[in-house]
């Protein structure tokens, strides 16, 4: 494909990147594999995908929900992670961003200001709800952005109803990955996308406490954020087992 050829759904690849699931490593692996031979959409956040003409790019990758991915159209890949592991990773990543000065915003300030138990107790904070509360389910059901969540809930819908939608959408995705098995993702990329990936470890937060060293009561507090994500993750594991 030349740079002037429009992309088609059959050749287009969309990576729905759920934060802190190993997605940075996978995104980088795609860029290395393409090495300038594909037209890559340059933005990563959902609001930046508004008004996109799908045929203009061959590869779309970002923190987008299923609705955006479906509108673009193409072969889709996503990676899930154990929900509590993901919550812990988010917390320590935010602390790292604040401590290094890489990012200073409400989320990173909260992580720097509070220890993990207190951070997990901030269940009514909208910024943390966006990042932690059933993030995987919201993203796979449609969109995890706060306006989309608020619009859905304001219509009287229950969050629990999204689980079935997310599981159905999961079954429509070309490659569903689990972060602990990147070799499988690379194999499926060769088989289903005709892309050879060399996935290297990236974006690992230094000096974080291992899950095994965290008080079980604190881990239970983390579980309170991710009840639906836990069920979605189990469905993803079942899909993976049947590959």
Image (cartoon, rainbow, N blue to C red):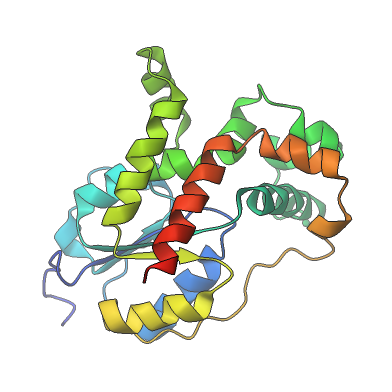
The residue shown at (37%, 20%) is 151
Q: Is residue 53 left or right of residue 69?
A: left
Quarter-wise, where is residue 74 in the image?
A: bottom left
Residue 229 versus residue 73 in the image, above or below = above
Position of 22 compared to 139: left or right? right
- Which of the image's four quarters has the N terminus? bottom left
Q: At x 67% / y 47%, what residue is drawn? A: 87
Image position, residue 175 (x, y; %): 35, 66
Q: Left of 237 or right of it: where is 66?
A: left
Name the side, left or right, on which 11 lies relative to 187. Answer: left
Q: Could you tell me residue 169's position as x and y percent?
A: 31, 48
Question: Does 152 appear above or below 162?
Answer: above
- Percent x, y for residue 43? 39, 57
Nearest the eye: 30 or 142: 142
Task: Count numbered badges in the picture.
Answer: 0
The C terminus is located in which quarter?
bottom left
Q: Measured along the vertical axis of the image, is residue 157 above or below residue 84?
A: above
The residue under the point 43% across, 20% down is 158
- The answer to whether residue 63 shows anywhere in this view is yes
Residue at 58 percent of width and 40 percent of height: 131
Q: Relative to the observer, which residue lies in front, 106 or 118?
A: 118
Q: Nearer the viewer, residue 132 or 168?
A: 168
Query: Quadrant location of residue 36?
Result: bottom left
Q: Which of 37 and 114 is in front in this view?
A: 114
Can residue 79 be seen? no
Look at the picture and state if 82 lies above or below 159: below
Q: Where is residue 192 in the image (x, y as percent from the top left)?
A: 27, 77
């Amino acid at each position: 494909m030349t740079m002037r050829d429009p992309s088609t759904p059959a050749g287009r690849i969309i990576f729905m990147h759920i934060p802190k699931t190993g997605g940075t490593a996978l995104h980088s692996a795609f860029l290395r594999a393409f090495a300038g031979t594909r037209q890559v959409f340059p933005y990563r956040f959902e609001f930046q995908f508004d008004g996109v003409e799908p045929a203009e790019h061959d590869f779309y990758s970002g923190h987008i929900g299923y609705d955006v991915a479906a509108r673009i159209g193409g072969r889709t890949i996503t990676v899930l992670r154990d929900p509590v592991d993901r919550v812990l990773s988010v917390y320590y990543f935010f602390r790292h961003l604040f401590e290094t000065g890489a990012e200073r915003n409400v989320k990173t300030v909260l992580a720097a200001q509070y220890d993990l138990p207190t951070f997990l107790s901030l269940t009514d904070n909208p910024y943390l709800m966006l990042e932690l509360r059933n993030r995987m389910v919201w993203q796979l059901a449609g969109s995890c952005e706060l306006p989309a969540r608020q619009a859905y809930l304001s219509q009287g819908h229950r969050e629990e109803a999204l689980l079935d939608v997310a599981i159905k959408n999961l079954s429509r995705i070309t490659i569903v990955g689990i972060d602990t098995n990147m070799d499988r993702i690379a194999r499926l990329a060769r088989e289903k996308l005709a892309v050879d990936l060399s996935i290297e470890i990236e974006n690992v937060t230094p000096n974080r406490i291992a899950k095994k060293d965290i008080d079980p009561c604190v881990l239970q507090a983390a579980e309170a954020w991710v009840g639906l994500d836990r069920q979605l993750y189990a469905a993803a594991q079942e899909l993976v087992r049947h590959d």
